[in-house]
Image: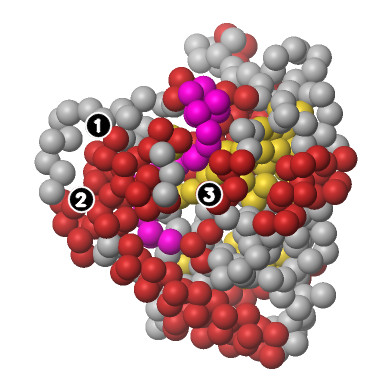
Amino acid sequence: DTAGSTEQGLRPRGVFGKLPRYAAGKPPVVVEGLESFKLSSNENPLPPLPAVLEAIASETSVNRYPDPMTTALRTELAGYLGVPATDIVTGAGSLGALNQILATFAGQNDFDAPDEVVYAWRSFEAYPISVGLAGAAGVQVPVRADGTHDLDAMAAVITDRTRVVMLCTPNNPTGPVLTRDDVVGFLEKVPAHVVVVIDEAYQEFVRRSDAVDGIELYRGYENVIVLRTFSKAHGLAGLRVGYSVSQPALTEHLRVSAVPFAVSQIAEHAAVTSLRHIDEVEVRVQSIVDERIRVVAGLRDLGWTIPEAEGNFVWLALGEHTQDFAVRAGEHALSVRAFGSEGVRVSIGEEAANTRFLALCRDFPHRPA
Ligand code: PMP
């Protein structure tokens, strides 16, 4: 019985054979007698605020579809960000919002000449998948040795076929930010037909005063889209709420490609409540930033070379020792994210997790260059 086999034509588009698979962060490793910690997905280690849990529990009318315009959330966000609510489009996580952006602006317009999407590499591992799924061709520009975007090289590869450039600040997994001057200088070189997406998933953890803040910047640029999320600082990764902010010239198209009802009423209510308790969120974020500062200082004291870390994670450029480090972390009940033979990304977690991570680094025989 060959029903359902590929010979019957039940096969996905050709690009599927070329797409990398998204490897989600490994679950916690169980080691007898040790508490396990998951440091592999840049999550917030703290549970949701009590008020957010109450908001979730109070959503009883899930027999109804949610508000497709997420008016309550966009109104609350507008107040928080100081932007018009009409500039905001919500999605199922910022990844959902990114997929909408790519579906809108980049694809396989012509079989011989797909649209091009330029992004730094290594960066967020979903980018090549999302770009490929959209039907566009990814143009990867290597990050510099210090983990920063090479914006000159990125500007240099823009062609008539380039439709979107992705900037990631702080860059996942390497950690550094782009400065405001960097981004303004770059935008001045980008032709008007190119959409520039600034992925700021970790913005709330940034402490460098000269770092770019897309929300301050986008009103001067009709081609800029800023991406933000409730997954990291707000600790709501499991609810899937993200959003984009851009001027009406772009936003009107994003509304057309928006997946209807992508944000559930539970997720919307939780996000609104979290924003209404932003002071408590900020205290928690600061506690994670404090731990990040302790971890980075601890690593540097041990003689480790660590790039600037402005998100809730650190990057260990361990090269050929990458997998070895990940195995050892597992033996200490720490799950971390290893990328081939490039390096290991370790999320800032609970204090005890970070302390154990530092002890592991102290005993590891190799140091990142
Ligand atoms: N952008 C970056 C840079 C990320 O690291 C992540 C999550 N790892 C996302 C976007 C997606 O986050 P979410 O879809 O949960 O908002």
Which residue extends farthest front?
A: 220
- Upstream in sequence: badge 1 or badge 2: 2
Tell me whether the residue at label 3 lies in contact with that at label 1, contact meaning CB atoms closer than 8 angstroms. no
Magenta stretch bounds: 233-254
Query: Is residue 9 visible from the viewing direction of this image?
Result: yes
Q: Magenta includes 243?
A: yes
- Upstream in sequence: badge 3 or badge 1: 1
Which residue extends farthest top?
A: 8
Q: Position of residue 138 (x, y in %)?
A: 74, 34
Please determine whether, in this image, residue 326 is positioned above or below residue 195. Answer: below
Q: Amino acid at mark 2?
A: Ile
In the picture, measured across the screen, residue 159 lies left or right of residue 289, that is right
* C-alpha span from label 2 to label 3: 28 Å
| Disc 1 packing (10 Å; few <14; some 14–19; many ≥20) | some
- Upstream in sequence: badge 2 or badge 3: 2
Q: Which mark is residue 215?
A: 3
Query: How many numbered marks have been drawn onto this rendered protein structure?
Result: 3
In the picture, measured across the screen, residue 263 lies left or right of residue 266, that is right
**Which residue is at 86% across, 47% downward?**
153
For the C terminus, the image quarter is bottom right
**Given this view, does label 3 or label 1 mark the residue nearer the observer?**
3
Mark 1 Cβ inside 8 Å of ligand 1: no
Q: Secondary structure at mark 2?
A: helix
Q: Which mark is residue 66?
A: 1
